[in-house]
Image: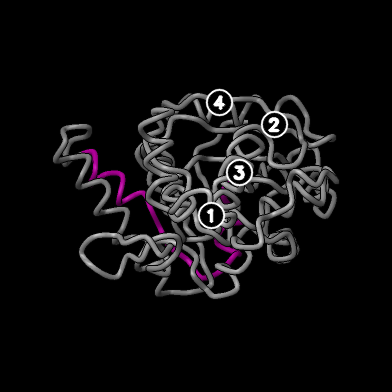
Amino acid sequence: MDIESVGVIGAGQMGNGIAHVMALAGYNVVLNDVNQTALDSALVQIQKNMARQVSREKITQSTMDTAIARIQTSLSLADIGATDLVIEAATERESVKQAIFDDLLPHLKPETILTSNTSSISITRLASRTDRPERFMGFHFMNPVPVMQLVELIRGIATDEPTFTACQRVVERLGKTSASAEDFPAFIVNRILMPMINEAVYTLYEGVGSVKSIDESMKLGANHPMGPLELADFIGLDTCLAIMNVLHDGLADTKYRPCPLLTKYVEAGWLGRKTQRGFYDYRGETPVPTR
């Protein structure tokens, strides 16, 4: 099927980034959230990010204005139903995603492709709760969406070839590169990345090095653009913990056991940049390590 309209559920960091790139690629976008403040903030963030692209001559002001005009916001899932492709980008909790799909299904066109931006949860299991497992798949963008070039495409056991091909064409239209991943816990990127971050937290927990020394060691010794603890703060420590729990539960291997210190930070509400405290304290002009 030809995809010309996209519904994005969730106006957080990932959702507004997805809406941003879809609108720039010429898709009509409906951005949905349960909170009007979140929708208003998302539009402000999209305009800010596009303005940065204009200042760097990545896009023109005319392109930005046209793209912004393509984005509509809505508090109602019914407004998502008329779109050709739906991308769920809510919090990384399976129960939340399933509840969204349950509420959304009565509003969908029969031919609409339903996808999830989940970074770790079983696509097959999510699809089984819907009326269209053959038209359901994983559509995993990397953060920040406007910058990162990779999109993981994950087929569930029932996903048909036309659905996969249609999503692949969307990625091509975005000017990004797709990687096909099998439906195993955390797929490709997070299957490799999250255990590294978790091991960095263990290194901190066991007193092998401080936050600063761990991050500087990986940036200067392994040429990583960000240290693993800095990256964890950027992703969100709650998201990191959720993915590690999916890996631990899904693969039943103790090497994926989340570090107790990671759990403690999440229990304290120190989730990283989005709460102004994580492995770094962001409340001042310069981030300060918390350990």
Residue closest to the eye, 99 or 275: 275
Name the amino acid, label 4: Ser
Q: Which residue is mark 2?
A: 163
Badge 3 or badge 4: first in the primary sequence = 4
State the separation of the CA atoms marked 3 and 4. 20 Å
Callout in the foreground (2, 3)? 3
Label ID, residue 178? 4
Callout 2–callout 3 Cβ contact below 8 Å: no
Residue at the image position 24 percent from the left and 54 percent from the top: 48
Numbered circles on residues, count: 4
Q: Which residue is mark 3?
A: 194
Callout 1–callout 3 Cβ contact below 8 Å: no
- Find residue 194 and report its horizontal and vertical position in percent: 61, 43
In the displayed structure, 2 sits above or below 49; it is above
Q: Secondary structure at mark 3?
A: helix
Residue closest to the eye, 138 or 272: 272
Callout 4–callout 1 Cβ contact below 8 Å: no
Quarter of the image with the C terminus in it: bottom left
How many residues crowd mark 3 within 10 Å: few (<14), some (14–19), many (20+)?
Answer: many
Name the amino acid, label 2: Thr
Residue at the image position 53 percent from the left and 48 percent from the top: 208
Q: Is residue 276 left or right of residue 136?
A: left
State the separation of the CA atoms marked 2 and 3. 29 Å
Q: Is residue 9 left or right of residue 214?
A: right
Residue at the image position 41 percent from the left and 26 percent from the top: 175
Callout 2–callout 1 Cβ contact below 8 Å: no
- Find residue 242 and report its horizontal and vertical position in percent: 66, 57
Where are the magenta residues, as a range? 63-85
Q: Which residue is mark 1?
A: 207
Name the amino acid, label 1: Gly
Q: Secondary structure at mark 4?
A: strand
